[in-house]
Amino acid sequence: MPPPRAPSAAAALAARALARITAAAPLVHDRLVGAATVMTHTQHVLSTIANEAEMRRVISLVSGLDNPDLPRHMELYHSNCGDAVTLAIVPSDPATTISNRSFAMGIIRRLLLSISHVTRGERRRCPGCHKESTRESSRDDSLRSVDEFGDHMLGCKSSLPTRTRLWHDPLVEVWFMLARVAGLSCG
């Protein structure tokens, strides 16, 4: 038997939207059917339920990519959760402006994509400390070695002076500026 016709085009669209939402978040249906006669903040409640269902789906996908002994993808995912500022800043001065290459690298890392590719049998090598990767993929490695995601390079002791000059010192200058703007005296 064919499904009943909707009384209007808007009702048909609403029914399709409800079907999509309840497929992803079954609790939405329970909330609508089992609700009291007066529902307050319905849209907020339904979007919260749908967002939580989507978050659980993403977490299960990310954990499926990870090495259980070294959950670097999950660490990075949780590190980026709630960061609504990074992509919303309007570049207006040197403190909020980065090069296209740095921006692309940050997005690649945020999307958990590999930044260095090697052919089968090749190993990655850190240009600073000359340490080599122990496996083709970091997923197969129980230690944090030179990996395809650039994590080793971010923490390598040989790059400490560069990190200090490019990251630490500019951040300290911004904090000092903010403290001065707030009326604090700082050295």
Image: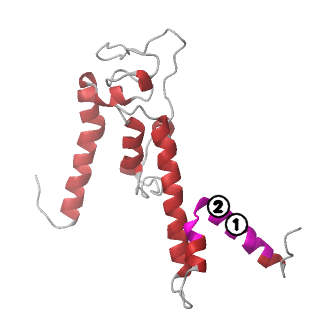
Q: Quadrant of the N terminus?
A: bottom right
- 21 sits left or right of 12 in the view: left
Rendered view: 111 above or below 96: above
Which amino acid type is shown beneath numbered disc 1?
A: Ala
- 52 sits left or right of 1 in the view: left
Rendered view: 162 above or below 43: above
* Residue 131 image offset from top left, x and y in percent: 32, 14
- 63 sits left or right of 154 in the view: right
Q: Residue at x 54, y 57 (%)?
A: 54
Query: Does dot 2 land on a helix, a strand or a loop?
Result: helix
Which amino acid type is shown beneath numbered disc 2?
A: Ala
Residue 19 is marked as 1
Residue 94 visible within the image: no
Cα separation, mark 1 vs mark 2, equals 6 Å
Magenta segment, prevailing SS (helix, strand or loop): helix
Answer with the quarter of the image where residue 158 lies: top left
Residue of label 2: 23
* Residue 112 image offset from top left, x and y in percent: 48, 37
Query: Does dot 1 land on a helix, a strand or a loop?
Result: helix
Q: Residue at x 40, y 28 (%)?
A: 150
* Residue 24 image offset from top left, x and y in percent: 61, 59
Residue situated in front as seen by the camera: 88 or 43: 43
- Asked whether disc 1 touches disc 2, contact meaning CB atoms under 8 Å apart, the reply is yes
The span shown in magenta is 12-28
Residue situated in front as seen by the camera: 141 or 38: 38
Q: Residue furthest right?
A: 1
Residue 139 visible within the image: yes
Asked whether 27 falls inside the magenta stretch, the response is: yes
